[in-house]
Amino acid sequence: MYAVEVRDHIMIAHSFKGEFFGPAQRVHGATFVCDVAFFREKLGSNEVVVDIGAAIDALKATLAPINYRNLDDVPEFKGKQTTTEFLARYVFEQMKAALKAGKLGADSEGVSKIRVTMHESHVARGWYEAAV
C-alpha cells in the first residue's frame, strides 16, 4: 500500500455542551495540526499517489472557512460537539469530495482510502479513516 500525507493547521475557538466535558464547556482555543493521508495499492501513471501540491491546496481550501473562527458560530456546526474526532470526519468528507471532483490531480483516481489525523496537542490526537 502506498501513501502520501499532507499537513496544515488551524487555530479555532469552541465550547462543548454537557457535564461530560467539564471545564471545556467554557469557550477555549485550540491549535490543531491536521494530517491527511491518501492510500492506494498501485501508483498512478506518473508514479505518484496524488499530486502533492494539489492535495496541499485542497487541504488549505478545506480548512480556510474554519481557521481563526469560533466553531460555535459556524452555521454548519450548529448543535454539534466539535470534538477532535468530529473535526477529523468533517475534514475527511471535504477531502473525499475534493478527490471525487478531480482536485487532487490526474493520478488520484486510484486512491482507495483517506485518513485524517487531528493533533490537538503533542500528547493527544484523533483520526477518522475510511474507504472512498
Image (cartoon, helix red, strand yellow):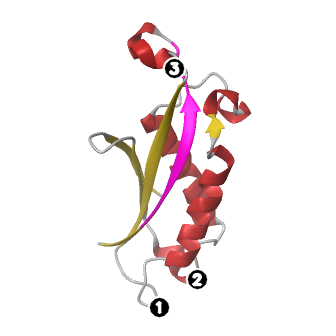
Mark identifier at residue 45:
1
Mark toward the start of the polypeptide (2 vs 1): 1
Mark toward the start of the polypeptide (3 vs 1): 3
Above or below 39: residue 92 = above
Q: Residue placed at 45% from the left, 19% from the top?
A: 24
- Position of residue 115 in the picture relative to residue 94 (left or right): left
| Contact flag, marks 2 and 1 (Cβ < 8 Å) | yes
Residue 22 x %, y %: 40, 12
Above or below 51: residue 32 = above
**Per the image, is 50 magenta?**
no
Q: Which residues are magenta?
A: 6-17
Mark 3: few, some, or many residues within 10 Å (few <14, many ≥20)?
many
Mark toward the start of the polypeptide (3 vs 2): 3
Q: Residue placed at 52% from the left, 82% from the top?
A: 107
Mark 2: few, some, or many residues within 10 Å (few <14, many ≥20)?
few
* Residue most extreme to the right: 75
Amino acid at the residue labelled 2: Ala
Q: Secondary structure at mark 3?
A: loop
Q: Which residue is mark 3?
A: 16
Viewer-side residue, 72 vs 95:
72
Q: Residue placed at 30% from the left, 39% from the top?
A: 124
Mark identifier at residue 8:
none
Q: CA distance from mark 2 to mark 1?
A: 9 Å
Q: Secondary structure at mark 1?
A: loop
Residue 58 x %, y %: 60, 65
